[in-house]
């Protein structure tokens, strides 16, 4: 039996056979760069906690005054969340993040020269530190909602939580490196040098982001059609991202939803717990657990090492649960697992007499906190894909409000009732955050569908 020769596609059609190109990997490079950007806020948040003891000693500041300085960061962080989200949706994260990083890097460096001007005005050193910390927080507040915008544009709908885990990966890496880095520099050259170096690092990263990034995948000069096909249609419609938004953010629809309010309140509970690690954890280790400054700096990195390990699994578990249980139950299951484990570990750890066991358990609680965190952000994209930055900015503003409360309230509880009671309160908040998620339905989209061929978006009436 003879075998027919192969058909020449060019002879039949008059044109050569199409060449199937391999997809580029620009989306993964963008997410890696996003990880680097999310490492930077640790320089602003954690550096003050690590240098707090040196600053307190130099300027004879009480715990209460230090609490206000730490809380000033969270105030600026909270107030700018909604404008940051709106800016991301309307102007794009390329320009917005570049400007924001430059802004807070310069203010970080300003911490080093602030004492020279403390006697020149009515603010005094405490007021001046509070003002600078406010501006640092305001700039760093642009990072999370812009990150959600990037993930919503560059990841497929089936991998949103995985995409958001790159941001928490950055938080974990930054948090793990920053305490050791800042403690080493503070001990070797003093706390002023550490803030100058942090500012220079931020300026370098802003230049890299501004040169390489684009707002949308199709704008990137190095991406090919095969990768665009893998990314798939945008989460908001059948054509690639309509936004940078031409229509106003549907605040009325968003704020009339029970899901939105449960999302916001539960995120406040989660954020309060995490702000403990960003502000008072180093002092908890040195004052309550009796560690030296250098050992405290090393052990203060353990929560962020846990975040580094746990957060990618949080994204994978959340997306897996959505594929198996549906978007509503899948997102709920990921939250319940992460926050329940976090609360239990905090409670067991703070009651342990052994320092090593206690620190490792409480640090693991931070890892499970951020394991769950990616699901909050992925749910913002689920609920309002074309306005994910606006909704996530609102959510993170609530987290910032918790950050204002956390340093002050933690100081009050620790002073009045002891550090164990302060951590017990965190356990209670973890339980409350779990319960609130019974009211969150990630399946019901909270925006009008964009009519580019996709007609079956679920809407909430």
Image: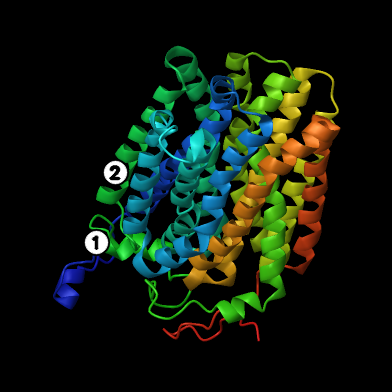
Q: Is residue 423 left or right of residue 136?
A: right
Q: Secondary structure at mark 2?
A: helix
Q: Quadrant of residue 14?
A: bottom left
Q: Between disc 1 and disc 2, whose residue precedes?
A: 1
Numbered disc total: 2
On the picture, is 129 further left or further right than 438? Answer: left
Label 1 belongs to which residue?
A: 19
Of badges 1 and 2, nearer the viewer stands 2
Q: Is residue 261 above or below residue 141?
A: below
In the depicted view, which residue is nearer to us: 153 or 395?
395
The answer to whether 58 is drawn above or below residue 178 in the figure is: above
Q: Which residue is mark 2?
A: 208
- Residue 208: give x, y in percent of width and height: 29, 43
Q: CA distance from mark 1 to mark 2?
A: 33 Å
In which quadrant of the rendered view does residue 68 lie? top right
Camera sees residue 105: yes
Q: Quadrant of the C terminus?
A: bottom right
């Amino acid at each position: 039996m003879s075998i027919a020769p192969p058909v020449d596609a060019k002879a039949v059609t008059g044109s050569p056979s199409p060449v199937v190109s391999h997809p580029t990997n620009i989306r993964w490079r963008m997410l890696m760069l996003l990880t680097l950007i999310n490492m930077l806020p640790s320089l602003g948040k954690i550096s003050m906690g690590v240098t707090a003891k040196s600053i307190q000693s130099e300027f004879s500041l009480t715990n209460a005054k230090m609490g206000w300085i730490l809380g000033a960061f969270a105030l600026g962080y909270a107030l700018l969340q909604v404008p940051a989200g709106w800016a991301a949706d309307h102007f794009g994260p390329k320009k917005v993040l570049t400007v924001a990083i430059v802004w807070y890097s310069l203010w970080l460096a300003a911490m080093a020269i602030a004492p020279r001007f403390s006697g020149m005005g009515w603010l005094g050193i405490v007021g001046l530190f509070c003002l600078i910390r406010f501006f640092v927080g305001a700039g760093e507040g642009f990072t999370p909602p812009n990150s959600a915008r990037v993930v919503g544009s560059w990841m497929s709908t089936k991998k949103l939580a995985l995409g958001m885990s790159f941001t928490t990966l950055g938080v974990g890496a930054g948090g793990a490196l920053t305490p050791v880095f800042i403690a080493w520099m503070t001990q070797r050259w003093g706390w002023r040098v550490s803030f100058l170096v942090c500012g220079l690092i931020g300026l370098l990263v802003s230049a890299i982001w501004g040169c390489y990034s684009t707002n949308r995948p199709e704008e990137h000069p190095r991406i090919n059609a095969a990768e665009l096909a893998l990314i798939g249609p945008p989460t908001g419609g059948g054509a690639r991202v309509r936004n940078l938004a031409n229509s106003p953010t549907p605040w009325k629809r968003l704020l009339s939803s029970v899901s939105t309010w449960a999302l916001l309140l539960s995120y406040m509970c989660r954020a309060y717990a995490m702000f403990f690690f960003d502000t008072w954890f180093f002092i908890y280790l040195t004052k309550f657990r009796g560690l030296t400054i250098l050992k405290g700096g090393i052990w203060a990195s353990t929560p962020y090492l846990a975040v580094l390990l746990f957060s990618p699994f949080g994204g994978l578990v959340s997306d897996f649960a959505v594929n198996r249980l549906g978007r509503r139950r899948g997102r709920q299951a990921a939250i319940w697992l992460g926050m329940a484990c976090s609360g239990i570990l905090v409670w067991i750890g703070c009651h342990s007499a052994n320092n090593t066991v206690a620190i490792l358990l409480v640090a693991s609680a931070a890892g499970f906190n951020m394991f769950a965190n990616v699901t909050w952000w992925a749910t913002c994209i689920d609920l309002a894909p074309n306005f994910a930055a606006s909704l996530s900015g609102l959510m993170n503003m609530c987290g910032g409000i918790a950050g204002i409360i956390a340093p002050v309230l933690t100081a009050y509880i620790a002073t009045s009732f002891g550090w164990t009671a302060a951590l017990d309160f965190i356990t209670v908040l973890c339980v409350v955050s779990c319960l609130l998620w019974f009211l969150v339905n990630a399946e019901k989209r909270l925006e009008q569908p964009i009519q580019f061929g996709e007609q079956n978006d679920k809407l909430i009436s």
